[in-house]
Image (cartoon, helix red, strand yellow):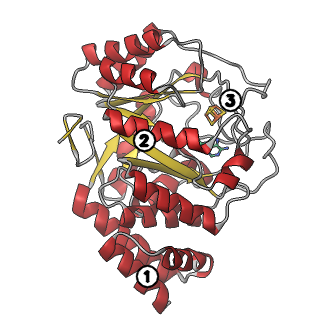
Amino acid sequence: MQEFRELADKLNRENDLTREEFLSMISMRGDLAKEDRDYLYGLAREKADSVYGKDIYLRGLIEFTNFCRNNCLYCGLRRDNRNVNRYRLTKEQILECADRGYDLNFRTIVLQGGEDLHYSDAEICEIVSGIKELHPDCAVTLSIGEKSRKSYEEYFRAGADRYLLRHETANEEHYGRLHPSELSMKNRMQCLYDLKEIGYQVGAGFMVGSPYQTEDCYADDFAFLHELQPEMIGIGPFIPHHETPFKDEKKGTLEDTLFFLAVLRLSFPDALLPATTALGTIHPLGREMGIQAGANVIMPNLSPVSVRKDYLLYDGKICTGDEAAECRHCMELRMEKIGYHVVTARGDHARFVEGRLH
Ligand code: 5AD
Ligand code: SF4
Ligand code: FES
């Protein structure tokens, strides 16, 4: 399709489109010929290679608590789900996981959890500084939800380098249909701006194919991302969880997820873009295809195997029975097979050196 390729070329050249052009481009995604799809992925992959070469950065994910005070309609860990075996890891267990990760050559440790008020700010700071003291060459990423600016400042002072907080959707009406009224899009966005201002490398993102999502929602997401300029952008398909109000909704597709990954790469050439576990869940080669469509980060799991099956945001999650070392080696082989190399590096954003803005 001539018009599609022209829009893809323009996005590749200018990293942006008008809202009308963007809407027109994404409205074509459902009936593209394979060659047009491959054309888009090819542009995105070239762009990623021009910034990051064939290097793939690893993040070791420690899911340290599955308690959550929130009730997001899409998420299997929502507080109303009584059929979750809730767990918390102790500081000692978390540091042990981080050590194991270090030995497996991870140089970024991601601490992810539900919004669990059991851990005080002081405890979070101790865990962060504990990891940094033992492994000063590691980046520490937090992914623990909405907190006050003061809390974010304390974690940063304790040594946290990065923060992941997906905005989920930049369309207010859509936000309201995915979340109970006690959560607000305004507050979520304020958190992201605070995190940026404090000096974190910030990750935003959204689900692909979530219930009630329209093309306008995607246009709002891209406009918001252009304004925020996050260092990382995490996207993955929505996958229903059987104990949530969205249990009968359709899942997001592989094609749409790859399409939006490629569009993100062309829009944000030096962003860190993970090929997510959710993408690997909807297709056995989803993560590989994500890399080939422009992603450059993989986030294998470092959580103890004993708790893995209890951190289910969605049904069918992969790697719930595998040891950290197995996932680490599995990803190395998978990347080599498609001509990429996982590297032992912190993998900071191009604007950051040793974790600090320069
Ligand atoms: N399907 C896909 N992704 C989900 N997330 C939460 N629930 C689901 C689901 N059912 C994503 C959200 C959240 C991130 C940690 O996981 O975007 O920010
Ligand atoms: Fe809690 Fe995060 Fe799940 Fe929402 S998406 S219910 S904040 S764990
Ligand atoms: Fe976990 Fe392949 S990445 S087993």
Give percent across and percent down for residue 185.
60, 44
Three-letter amino acid code at the position of disc 2: Tyr
Q: Nearer the viewer, mark 2 or mark 3?
A: 2
Residue sitting at 35 percent across and 60 percent down? 268
Q: For mark 1, what is the residue? A: 7
How far apart in space, not on screen, are marks 2 and 3 (Cα)? 21 Å
Secondary structure under badge 1? helix
Three-letter amino acid code at the position of disc 3: Asn
Q: For mark 3, what is the residue? A: 70
Tell me if 79 is positioned left or right of 317 in this view.
right
How far apart in space, not on screen, are marks 3 and 1 (Cα)? 40 Å
| Disc nearer the start of the sequence (2/3) | 3
Quarter assignment of residue 58:
top left
Q: For mark 2, what is the residue? A: 193
Q: Residues within 10 Å of mark 1 (few under 14, many from 20)?
A: some
Give percent across and percent down for residue 143.
48, 31
The extreme bottom residue here reads 2
| Disc nearer the start of the sequence (3/1) | 1
174 above or below 163?
Answer: below
| Disc nearer the start of the sequence (2/1) | 1
